[in-house]
Image (tube, coloured by chain):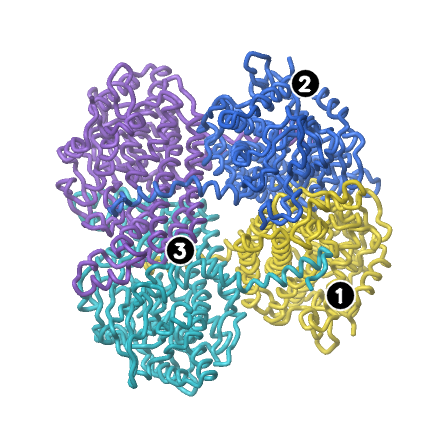
Chain colours: A purple, B blue, C yellow, D cyan
Amino acid sequence: MVLKTKQQYVQSIKRMKSEAYMRGERIEDLTKNGLTRLALEGVGEIYELSKQPKYSSLLTRQAQGGPRISAYCSIHRSREDLVNRVRAARLICQMTGVCTASRCCGWDCLNALWYTTYEMDTRLGTVYHKRLKRYATMVQGKDLTCAGALTDPKGNRSLKPKHQPDKDVYLRVIDENKKGIVVRGAKSMIGGAIGSHEIIVQPGTGFAEAETEHAVAFAVPMNTKGVTQVVNMQPGGERKLEAGFDKGNVGFGSSESLVIFDDVFVPKERVFMNGEFEYAVDVVTKFVLLHRMVLGGCLAGCGDVLTGAAALLAEYNGLSRQLSDRLTEMTYLSEALYSQALGAAYEGQSTPSGAWFPDPLLANVTKISVTRLPYEIQKIAEDIGGGMISCMPSELDLTNPKVGPLVEKYYRGLAGVTAEKRLRVARLIESMVAGPGRLGALCMHGGGSPAAAQMTVRQLANLERKKELARRLTGVPAAS
Amino acid sequence: MVLKTKQQYVQSIKRMKSEAYMRGERIEDLTKNGLTRLALEGVGEIYELSKQPKYSSLLTRQAQGGPRISAYCSIHRSREDLVNRVRAARLICQMTGVCTASRCCGWDCLNALWYTTYEMDTRLGTVYHKRLKRYATMVQGKDLTCAGALTDPKGNRSLKPKHQPDKDVYLRVIDENKKGIVVRGAKSMIGGAIGSHEIIVQPGTGFAEAETEHAVAFAVPMNTKGVTQVVNMQPGGERKLEAGFDKGNVGFGSSESLVIFDDVFVPKERVFMNGEFEYAVDVVTKFVLLHRMVLGGCLAGCGDVLTGAAALLAEYNGLSRQLSDRLTEMTYLSEALYSQALGAAYEGQSTPSGAWFPDPLLANVTKISVTRLPYEIQKIAEDIGGGMISCMPSELDLTNPKVGPLVEKYYRGLAGVTAEKRLRVARLIESMVAGPGRLGALCMHGGGSPAAAQMTVRQLANLERKKELARRLTGVPAAS
Amino acid sequence: MVLKTKQQYVQSIKRMKSEAYMRGERIEDLTKNGLTRLALEGVGEIYELSKQPKYSSLLTRQAQGGPRISAYCSIHRSREDLVNRVRAARLICQMTGVCTASRCCGWDCLNALWYTTYEMDTRLGTVYHKRLKRYATMVQGKDLTCAGALTDPKGNRSLKPKHQPDKDVYLRVIDENKKGIVVRGAKSMIGGAIGSHEIIVQPGTGFAEAETEHAVAFAVPMNTKGVTQVVNMQPGGERKLEAGFDKGNVGFGSSESLVIFDDVFVPKERVFMNGEFEYAVDVVTKFVLLHRMVLGGCLAGCGDVLTGAAALLAEYNGLSRQLSDRLTEMTYLSEALYSQALGAAYEGQSTPSGAWFPDPLLANVTKISVTRLPYEIQKIAEDIGGGMISCMPSELDLTNPKVGPLVEKYYRGLAGVTAEKRLRVARLIESMVAGPGRLGALCMHGGGSPAAAQMTVRQLANLERKKELARRLTGVPAAS
Amino acid sequence: MVLKTKQQYVQSIKRMKSEAYMRGERIEDLTKNGLTRLALEGVGEIYELSKQPKYSSLLTRQAQGGPRISAYCSIHRSREDLVNRVRAARLICQMTGVCTASRCCGWDCLNALWYTTYEMDTRLGTVYHKRLKRYATMVQGKDLTCAGALTDPKGNRSLKPKHQPDKDVYLRVIDENKKGIVVRGAKSMIGGAIGSHEIIVQPGTGFAEAETEHAVAFAVPMNTKGVTQVVNMQPGGERKLEAGFDKGNVGFGSSESLVIFDDVFVPKERVFMNGEFEYAVDVVTKFVLLHRMVLGGCLAGCGDVLTGAAALLAEYNGLSRQLSDRLTEMTYLSEALYSQALGAAYEGQSTPSGAWFPDPLLANVTKISVTRLPYEIQKIAEDIGGGMISCMPSELDLTNPKVGPLVEKYYRGLAGVTAEKRLRVARLIESMVAGPGRLGALCMHGGGSPAAAQMTVRQLANLERKKELARRLTGVPAAS
């Protein structure tokens, strides 16, 4: 059995001592900082649930000719794998209430590179796919968590990479020798970087011939020399640094980092693309296909938690019946996201590499819905939650001898519902609407902007065929 | 080969001489009345396409131990059958631009009764399932079109059936003997009744013990004595009675009727429920599951046509580039409907009877989306279409010697785009937005009202589990 | 008293014998054609209500130094006049359920030209304003209805007027002499042209120096030689040609025409712009300001009627209580439109000419709302109306001896609610959603497209000031 | 001149030493706690701007027979006063970016009580209005800030006040003598309480005869014995406790408190209602009318700031042109809110007391829009802001010698746009979307829940008149 326990995972990350900064200071022990500890718990829950019989068939896969491995470092080899991908996303978000992006993004990178390196090897005679296979087998065997890194800082977005005054705003190869390459640059908003053993880096956009230095993909351990993280502070992130329930979700968290590559050496067996600029767009496209599909599952899962919290608060306030319509609407919205993701998964197709990918059109459609429906979910949660959401005393007030009893007296709900219960649930809603686990941070730009998804839908819309359908029904002659 | 040609279908309907009225007069020949002729063409296109190699695998099924039969009178026997059901719905709507409800509703009735009669026979020792099997085999063998009839007139909707002053407002059994039963009542809004060989009648709602007389299901030929139709006139229906293109869709149409059963005798081998009131709700539920799922395919198909028409008109006006974003949004909306329907289909399950049904929650979610997204599609089409939509001269003006040349002069678009071309396409948009093929008539109440779907979502929402998820993350103890 | 009675109005129009075509034939008597008769009733109701003490203060104005004249040919001389403009629009739409565009558009043209001619006379030394004053006094004294005509056919919309292969697709001056000018071209979608004594023509867009021939404004009687109308057929327009209630609104109607100017001579005292291309954009801007504001009142009034019809049908079906939330939403939507229009009116400003105009930003904001909210109103009406909307027998079926009694039996509602009552109300909803009085035809492109309103909002948004507000709060230094 | 300077205001509040707790500890000096200091700056800005010639005509009023007083403690005595109320709300939100609820709520309470006490004195012969006049004159003369307190904790919301196990969950009179009354209870979510000199308490709901003890209105200084505050911690509230720009809005803040009345004595000249339960609903209704109207102005102002911030970030990223449509939509949404509030103000009416109130229907319509449109504004801001919103390093990272230069390198935008500039603006957006100044906290429940506003719209909808309109157009006879 290669699967790590949660405890093994957490300790293995702690031991790596990756170089990470937060609020201007080096984090010495990731398990002692409140925010990073919660993020480790979030990813750790995947390890935990993978061991439970109830979930293991969903969260693990039978490796070809080997032991069961974590699904989170597997290659999707069937339609069912894609569907289970969506199911797993919903489950993990239900159980943690947070984005465990690291394992997801690394998973997507592995699959995207699986396809792209296969194509490169086949057409260009390179050996990237062979390298990647070895790398994937190592990752699977050690049950590692790999962050996936795409987004470059981009500087002035109206200029192409080749026209940027500082070329480093797109990560690039600055040197190369027989043993490997040296890279410089940064990747932004890297989900779960602090909880990752490895980071897989790939292009975040297509590149032109004059931009070959940027067409690079590779993987390095997170504690590689020259790799430095700055952990982002989300709204309410400060609360994660504290004990207590004001943070809303008391069990799990997430994190994102700016990951800086300050002249980092990458040995060549860990390089999976190096200058083949025509393939940059492929690896991006395949990554986002997976990611845009899977977000439908993630947001459905988060929607479930938020629906449950809203239902609970309605119950505590004695308003379950009156708010029933709105809870139903929340359910509808979550399921609409889920069914779209399932549609994209079930309609997926295989590739020559053996890896499966979702239907391109439906995956992008799912992403567009993901940038809209969760906002409706949030809004209803806020409506149901009442003025209390964003107007609550701190947990610390509950223990003050003077005001504690008064807070208790005036925040009670139905018989048996203590102030603490109501505040705990209200804080969860608050945190998912406007705090450190808010849906908006996950849904709008995860997997790319809505505009990017719309552009893909436009490309795949096949308007010519639709025009032909219209001509047929109107009696206008077909286009020649 | 049991499949009828389109021509055979049309002639077989003509020969039945079912009793149908329109605008206060008996229709003598359904193939000569413009409106009913178009409706026959609509259903006829299913016959036509089923014969084409390109579509036959989608539109026909291999009967168990027999020839290929039309999918439209088959039982869904696998997940794939459900998925193909959605695909077929989209295809037929793409190819005809209209609702061919008769074959669909009959198809759904057959499947809903397949399940329900099986349950009844198993538990009550009745012989309904045996009868239904024989009936289905007959329908398949003759490749018949069966209307499906559920909706009772209902009278005062605030009263239950048993309290209605006129009991006939819910169809009911008024007499019974050894040979069969006599029924009285009516069914409203029966799609495609005029183009059907048979009509399958089933309850449209659940019934209580005091309402057993209404718990009845049966099938009769459309030309049975005592069965009378009044064909509805939709907005713009009058245009279908005319030649020319002002009707928008010049090739195909649809129709709905009030079908009245004025003391109609039904021989007992055609009776599939007779008083088993506890099963009424089952047969309704199973019917609507199929129908609410499949509407996602239908509306996606109609959305495709409307998107194509809008794209065509944008092209004729020289505005394709400027309107590209809005066309993309139309595409997104159609695909969102489609993917939800696919999700519901793929997640479908089998029943002891062997018939498969969609996932109940996702099918109802699809229906809710169907009551919303098509309105957005329509609105964008109207935006793209410009003021011309709803402000056009009649086709007849084009041939008037005085104004014809002026209309031609002032309605031309890009070079090569005649006034007629622009008007034809604009009339198609108009008819789908506000005329005889409008999406709104199809999407809002087809398969039941949005409120009915919402009620089902509420029942299936499993709020208790969601509350448990929320409790887990907040540290509030689990409910005992 | 200069005000005409409704009867005098109708007869005066009949006597003009303007040249109008419909469905390929000349209309000999506008009072005998069902559609045009209803349109005359619509505008006629303004005449009717203006005489009623209850409404006369709203619908008439005290002319300067003269008798009370119709508001519909007055110049707005105060903030209160603008507010009353919105109130009158709502009232007339409430009382007629239709767009009485002719009097409104002519009113707007008079005001737009009042401003623009004043500016031209002041700056260029022309005499257009003096001419217009005389013209306005004549119109007021005779209580005439003036159509207002802006929209050119435009041909290929991607080309500017000067590049059109057929220059006539923008109306233009083709000849000129001491006595006047000769114009050729057409104006599209002219609301109420058949019920107008006069037609006021003005540019529908700005023009460049090379396009001076198109910068022309003038007025002619509708029966001027060379002026020909082709009356448009809206969806369901055919029903207006018939007796009976299937048309929904049995009392009133509207109409739109393509008005063709086939080398029409205009005497110079009726020419209000002739080549002053720099002023074309002014007269368009001022027209649309009024129109975009007033649509908020119109759609609120139509919304009121549709809300009332939906409430009535809910009552007939015994569902008033259950549908109360949705009726409230309809009310909200109508009032939101109304309050925006009021905001634009109250914030209006005077001009040197003495004419008042609405706040430019708020008038355009109102228009954007007008392209959105009425669709929500329609959708709810369709939801409340039930499947019956678009699935009804014809009125003619009620009188057929065979099926009439059956239709009566099965379409009854609550006690005392006959089938006819239900059908009449359902047909009204149907016609306002999808038929000859539908809101969509009025709201999307009336007063220009949503894109045009958005462009104006963009121009007026003053983003620089807003950026300054943001800088101030963030501590980022102000832009130098 | 009675107007205080900002400095005088801040010092006067500091000197009061009101008893306030935050995060479990007593706040010793409100000017030293980061959060409360910012809140004082927010309200203080009203004092500041009132002194500036540019704004004084808007923010001050001429007292009857006296000096200019702050508008924020005046009685609305004309339509223009109501309109200026809306304008002032927009201005203050533009200039501060936050809710300065204290002065607004107190202002509304004064006006609501002005009307209600007048009615009581007139009908019941009480002396409340005389007392209130003296109180108002005192407040105006000293230029005091008064919090307004309505919302009771409510306990189990499904029970009426008289059935609550703990009667104190609705504030009530527990004792009374010749000198005054003693009250017990609490008021929740009291905006700006820490920055107020006085607190005006009034019923938050109607009461029945058996609930007279709750029908009480009065005012006390915030530092009255027995009055204790617990200051709420909003999402991101912790950041306000820190220096630096991570809080987004660096100049201004807001605060809300639970205000507890632990057996507080109120002298009778400060009691404005005491048991007159029939008048409780009046004072609530009048309060919310003002509040629901004015929120349209507030949210428009906050929308302006957010639009400006989004425009600024778009500019820094080199994307102004591409994002122009979305910025226009933000502008539309803000102006739609503003115009609705203006409509409600302009349509306001006077009362016998001399106080003016907005149109009841339009004020509630504005509130409904306020619960919807700001969410759209937020969503677009988040879309424009990009993934950076919610994924930013802390300001503290900028000064770390190791990572500071790297953060600077990788967060730069266009030439001249430093990382700090981009981060400052992005933090402002973040805080308004999801942090301590977020729109959602202000718009959803401020002035009551959306459901409360909808209930009022239902009551005022006058469906009977609308039904009559519909009957008239259908030919259905009028109701007798």
Assess disc 3: are there few (<14), some (14-19) or many (≥20) residues with their C-alpha within 10 Å of its C-alpha.
many
> Amino acid type of disc 3?
Gly
Q: Residue furthest bottom?
A: D65
Q: Chain of mark 3?
A: D
On whether disc 2 and disc 1 are found on a single subunit, the reply is no
Foreground: disc 3 or disc 1: 1
| Residue B387 sits above or below residue C42 on the image | above
Residue C267 position, x and y percent, is 80, 60
Residue at x 40%, y 57% (from the top left corner): D444
Give the number of callouts: 3
Q: Chain of mark 1?
A: C
Residue at x 34%, y 77% (from the top left corner): D218
Q: Which residue in the protein does label 3 denote?
A: D308
Q: For the N terminus of chain C, give its image quadrant.
A: bottom right
Q: How far separated are the C-alphas under marks 2 and 1?
A: 62 Å
Q: Which residue in the protein does label 1 denote?
A: C47
Nearest to the observer: residue C401 or residue A345: C401
| Residue B50 sits above or below residue A244 on the image | above
